């Protein structure tokens, strides 16, 4: 008996990000989380708040989020801690929406998003004060 190959998880997300989330998805998110943030994982607002308290970030510091999807929870942490954010993911559709979400939250030039594989990040060492990933390698 043969085995069925698992689809590449990034391909799965590429398909998902190519479609805009419908109103029903937004309503579910609002009901479960309290507000619609473009979530694609399981990190609640309360958990994102815990990250804000826990991460060693100061105003003007630099946070890297790997597998940022639509920017959650990175933009939340960056806004709360007044730090810079570099979000990275692979599907370009996700990065485009992440940039838009960061704009809505007035992060402006403090948030940049790069297409990069978390297994081979194109950054020099010791340039970030903290690194987060939320449900990235699942
Ligand atoms: C469950 S989603 C979580 C997205 C976002 N952090 C959230 O909580 O809404 C997982 C994300 O990890 C990304 N991802 C998976 N493998 C990756 C890899 N090797 N490098 C970068 N991103 C990856 C996917 O593209 C997807 O956006």
Image: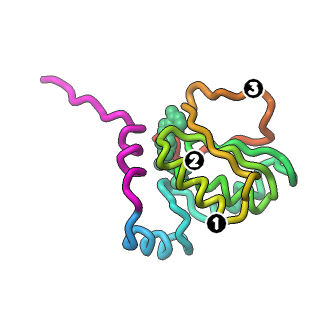
Image point (37%, 38%), residue name: 11
Q: Secondary structure at mark 2?
A: loop
Residue 132 showing in the rendered view: no
Q: Where are the magenta residues, as a range?
A: 1-20
Q: Nearer the viewer, mark 2 or mark 1?
A: 1
Precedes in sequence: disc 2 or disc 1: 2
> Does residue 81 appear left or right of residue 28 in this picture?
right
Instruction: Give residue 68's mark.
Output: 2
Residue 56 showing in the rendered view: yes
| Residue that label 3 marks | 124
Image point (69%, 44%), residue name: 86
Precedes in sequence: disc 3 or disc 2: 2
Q: Residues within 10 Å of mark 1 (few under 14, many from 20)?
A: few
Q: Residue 92 location in percent, x, y? A: 49, 43
CA gap between label 2 and label 1 equals: 16 Å
Instruction: Give residue 117's mark.
Output: none
Image point (51%, 59%), residue name: 39
């Amino acid at each position: 008996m043969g085995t069925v190959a698992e689809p590449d998880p990034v391909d799965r997300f590429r398909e998902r990000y190519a479609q805009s989330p419908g109103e029903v998805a937004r309503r579910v998110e609002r009901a479960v989380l309290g507000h619609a943030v473009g979530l694609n994982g399981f990190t609640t607002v309360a958990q994102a708040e815990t990250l804000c308290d826990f991460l060693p970030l100061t105003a003007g510091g630099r946070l890297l989020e790997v597998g940022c999807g639509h920017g959650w929870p990175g933009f939340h942490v960056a806004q709360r801690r007044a730090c810079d954010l570099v979000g990275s993911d692979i599907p370009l559709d996700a990065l485009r929406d992440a940039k838009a979400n960061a704009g809505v939250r007035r992060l402006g030039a403090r948030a940049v998003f790069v297409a990069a594989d978390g297994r081979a990040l194109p950054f020099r060492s010791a340039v970030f004060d903290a690194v987060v990933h939320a449900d990235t390698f699942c």
